[in-house]
Amino acid sequence: MIFIRQKRGIIAILVALILSSLYVFRGYIFLENMPKAGIALSFDDRYIKEWYQLRPLFKKYNAHVTFYLTQPDSLSTEEWNMLRILAQDGHEIGCHGAIHTQSIPFVWRNSIQEYLDIEIHQALKTMQSHGYIPHTFAHPGGSQFWWLDQKLYQYFDLLRDVSLKKRKLGNWVFERNINEINEIYFRPNQSKSVSALMIDIGNELSEKEITKVLIKARNTQSAVMLFGHKPLFQSAKTGQEYGFEVEFLTYILSESAKLGLITYTMAELSQFNKP
């Protein structure tokens, strides 16, 4: 009888621990839906004048996006004024680092503290001097590792990484099926580190593929995260340009509107991650 009671006690403890674990990790196991399915667009680097030209397009679709700013200490007064107007339009100005370095090789050669001092602290200092307190950060080059992310959470509510359909490593080309790229769909309480799918021409996304992505966001009641760099107002000539065609962005916004998707900034997404 004593053995049975002890066995039952052990089972009860195990059940309690399992239920406790399920509660702690409920954001990973029982995925919570967004209040409304949507799309989160972000744009990297410092193409301020080109981004500014997108204002009429964003206003047409009532779209609010995130601009991840790098090398802020080199911006002109005109560029800061443009950013101010973009922020007044409801767009987010996020951080993309002071020197736009890839974190893994930098930390390997130096240290995490030097990375924070040179890439993060300096960027925040410059941005704050112009009235911006960024709440989200985009890793330059998609270079990140979990230990550094733990440090960056002290400064940012959300960290954005890079997701690619097509990746080239030397002479090798690795390509993923668009239906299998699941990390680009934001759900509340999953993680403070997220990934966005690149829409630059080098990733070779088709309109058919992006439509599948948008439909999946609607059907899963999530927010799909997409990002690009420089807006290309004319059709790309070589296929090697470091940016996305504005015509493609227009298609994305148009299809999103047809599907009833709303737009989120990355900072807005971070608010769905409950403490």
Image (cartoon, rainbow, N blue to C red):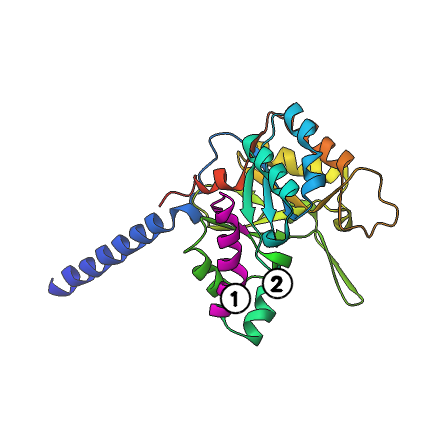
Secondary element at tag 2: loop
- Tell me whether circle 1 and circle 2 mark residues in contact (CB < 8 Å): yes
Above-or-below relation of 20 to 66: below
Residue 258: x and y in percent read 66, 24
Amino acid of disc 1: Tyr
Amino acid of disc 2: Thr
Instruction: Please tell me which residue is depicted at 61% across the width and 57% down the height of the picture.
Output: 140
Q: Is residue 46 magenta?
A: no
> Residue extending furthest left?
2
Q: Which residue is mark 1?
A: 115
- Left or right, 57 with respect to 4, comes to right
Front one among 106 and 52: 52
Q: Earlier in the sequence, mark 1 or mark 2?
A: 2
Distance between mark 1 and mark 2 Cα atoms: 9 Å
Q: Main secondary structure of the magenta part?
A: helix
> Residue extending furthest bottom?
109
Instruction: Please tell me which residue is depicted at 42% across the width and 45% down the height of the picture.
Output: 189
Front one among 163 and 176: 163
The stretch of residues the image draws in magenta is: 113-137
Q: Which mark is residue 60?
A: none
Q: Is residue 128 magenta?
A: yes
Front one among 107 and 33: 107
**Residue 170 position by quadrant:** bottom right
Q: Which residue is mark 2?
A: 101
- Left or right, 237 with respect to 136, comes to right
- Left or right, 163 with respect to 157, comes to right
Q: Residues within 10 Å of mark 1 (few under 14, many from 20)?
A: some
Instruction: Please tell me which residue is depicted at 44% across the width and 54% down the height of the picture.
Output: 155
Numbered marks: total? 2
Residue 15: x and y in percent read 27, 54
Above-or-below relation of 21 to 54: below
Instruction: Please tell me which residue is depicted at 57% across the width and 57% down the height of the picture.
Output: 98
